[in-house]
Image (tube, rainbow, N blue to C red):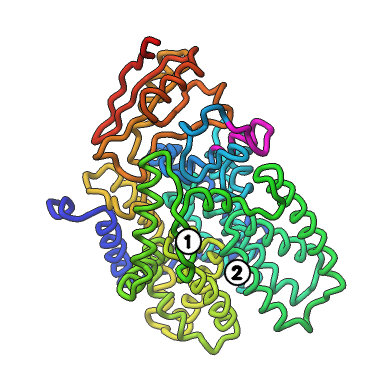
Amino acid sequence: MLWSFTMSWNQTLFAVEALLVLAFLAFNYHPGKTEKALNRLARHRLAPLAVGVFALALRAIVLPIEPIPVARGDDEFSYLLQADTFAHGRLANPTPPLWEHFETFHVDQLPTYASMYPPLPGLVLAFGQLLFRTPFAGVWLSVGIMCATLCWALRGWFPPGWAFLAAVIAAIRLGAFSYWADSYWGGALAAIGGALLFGALPRLLRAGRSRDALLAALGMVILANTRPYEGSVFSVAVGVVALWYIRKLRLRTIAPAMCAVLVSAGALMAYYNWRVFGSPTTLPYTINRQTYAVAPVYLFQNPGPPKVYRHKEMRDVFMGWEMGIFERARTREGFLAVCIAKIYWIWSFFVGPALTLPLLAFPGTWRSWRTRVLLFMSVPIALANIVVPFFQPHYLAPATVVFYAMVIQGMRALNRNMPRIGPRAVRAMPLVCIAMIGVRVALTASMLPDDVASPTKTWAGTSHTFRGRENIIHRLLEHGGKHLIVVHYGPQHVLGEDWVHNAADIDAAPIIWARDMGPEKNTELMRCFRTRKAWWLEVDTDAKLSPLSEPAP
């Protein structure tokens, strides 16, 4: 077993998965009664509900191995701030006193103290916080709904058995260990929106019921409030397909229902923007990017003017890390490297060795109208992500249902065109995915080194190795009372592991995190919160907490 210590987490995961694929292909398995029972379940009208319950149960079962996650990334803390704000019955919070000490990433301090992200993820997390006392319950429920919605959507395009198979694979691959189910970054909600829109399209073409129009409109609303950019591109792609078959649409039936949902949602979104950002037409992230960012969102844009930063760590991220990625991606070699990296991350997260074979078989089905429609919908999403320098797998979440539709097409091609090995390969894929759950559990107890450069890019990655902040929180809460922590970063501080994140109600929070701004401003801060025990936190290669006394006047 010495070889395992020379391989990283991701390399070992992919190697074992590839070996399992080869092993199951060599194994001639005839499920018999089991397959017949699953086919009967797949044809039942409650099959999507069964898939959703399966996904929820699977994540609950692995909780001892992968417990409720601790937020690490700046995005996660921003979503949690939004959830805490909604849980307090507010759309935004008033700007706190001495707000310069509380500046942090992806959070606006002016005109209100609020997350820069669209509201739907925060609403779902707030639902979990209010009903189950943990925002993670919102993540858990959204993943189950995602898997159920994928099954429902694919049943509109494929026979029930194939749709059921793909949805079960999605539940295994995305519902147990992926960061969509193990963080507060999101992914599942945008996938739900895309699945509702994608699944409603064939139903509208066949029957034109107002119910399906409502679901399609709901999908567009979800996309606009989770991934506005990619969601808009996907909505337009689906709309173009609908226009191509416009003669089949019963516009008099579906248009009123869709307009009612879209107009109502648009009014609510405008009201939210007005209350939080001061303008009905100001998108949630606009103020934040205008305040802090220099690197633009798209590669064809020019960098913005230099900004004034009060904190070195924020300058290092926006002027250093972001601008470095943007400028490199604008070169020929850098653009090619970024594109290759994106393709690898997509393969690592969505495909892996288990689903590579059906994806390779998919282009052979190009004569099918389904394949042409799927390719047409996937191309705009791909182009939309090519022109941005940054990427995470959840950027593609709106098109998750399209990916699994491609998997089904490839599986059907294997099953039909390769009678000797095709059916065996199709049966092997869910078995490999199930077996990989056990492998993932075993790897949790191993001594394999992490792939720190991209820990979340695989379906079984984890990004929650950083727990220093959580340990200090537990330590201070055991002492009782209220605390103020002034954070100072040393030269060896890891960029991206920021400690200054606060609750929605800063005054009532047991712990306030603030940035060091020098003795004079720190003294002003301590006097403002004089009822709290003040601490000095030195964050470098490690974290050292020590009492902080106010200097004599």
Quadrant housing residue 244? bottom right
Quadrant housing residue 343? bottom left
Quickly name the residue at label 2: 234
* Residue 134 falls left or right of residue 206: left
Q: CA distance from mark 1 to mark 2?
A: 22 Å
Nearer the N terminus, badge 1 or badge 2?
2
Quickly name the residue at label 1: 296
Judged from this view, the residue extending furthest toward the left is 2
Circle 2 SS class: helix
Depth check, front residue: 83 or 298: 298
In the image, residue 370 above or below residue 85: below
Depth check, front residue: 144 or 112: 112
Q: Percent x, y for residue 24?
A: 33, 67
Of the residues tagged 1 and 2, which is closer to the observer? Answer: 1
Q: Which residues are magenta?
A: 81-95
Residue 47 in sight from this viewpoint? no
Does the magenta-highlighted stretch encompass residue 191?
A: no
| Residue at 58% in and 27% down | 505
In the image, residue 523 above or below residue 212: above
Q: Residues within 10 Å of mark 2 (few under 14, many from 20)?
A: many
Q: Residue 530 has which mark?
A: none
| Residue at 36% in and 23% down | 519
Depth check, front residue: 212 or 17: 212
Circle 1 SS class: loop
Does the magenta-highlighted stretch encompass residue 93?
A: yes
Callout 2 amino acid = Phe
